[in-house]
Amino acid sequence: MENCNLKYIPDRLHTNNRPIIRKFNLGHLLYHRAKPEDVENPYKRVTIAELSHNLGGDPHNPLSQPQDVLFSVKNDEVVEKYEDREICTLKIISLNDENHYDKEFSQEKNGHNATGRIKLIHKPVPCMYPHCTFRVWLNGTIVTYDNYKQTLKKWNKIRTELKEELASMMIKRVVSQE
């Protein structure tokens, strides 16, 4: 993998040939940037395709800090940090026996069956080692922005369940009136 050339990204976030994380732990945190108006549930109106997050990891030994998700890691962007975004925090609340976050959803409609799948994948980029994605499949095909209308958009129940699954992992902010 290439080296990070963005001087504003802290060295602790550079990939530097560190290994891919293949297993996760319950309670590990994930960070996602969202528009302020969507921060309560950023998955409500989003197209469910590959969704980027940063792995915070163990709260007692973090891999990244919440504000790290605001950094731009694209060489061709003029912005260094997304000042107009807010941070959503998710907590891994369920894993399979192999310590992977990998879930399936199904739907029957008009005599046809479909299976949706969502999996958390550590997918580091040179300037952001903690970068992960929730990858989505429909009937074995990876859902992308390009094929969304021909795949997942046609299966409302699966799409809704995927969004609800992601929303269920969010750590909600509680505002005290005292």
Image (cartoon, rainbow, N blue to C red):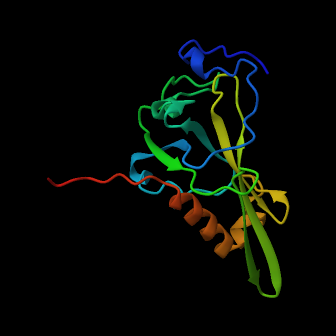
Quadrant of res 12: top right
Which residue appears at 64% of the width and 20% of the height?
A: 14
Please state the horizontal and vertical placement of residue 39, each as a whole percent of the image.
42, 50
Please state the horizontal and vertical placement of residue 175, each as a whole percent of the image.
26, 53
Vertical order, 142 against 14 (above or below): below
Which residue appears at 35% of the width and 51% of the height?
A: 173
**In the rendered picture of this protein, how many numbered marks are placed on residues?**
0
- Furthest residue to the left? 178
Please state the horizontal and vertical placement of residue 167, each as a whole percent of the image.
52, 59
Question: Foreground: 25 or 171?
Answer: 25
Which residue appears at 54% of the width and 48% of the height?
A: 27
Q: Is residue 128 visible?
A: yes
Q: Is residue 57 left or right of residue 23?
A: left
Question: Foreground: 111 or 30?
Answer: 30
Q: Is residue 45 visible?
A: no
Vertical order, 108 against 78 (above or below): below
Q: Is residue 178 left or right of residue 130?
A: left
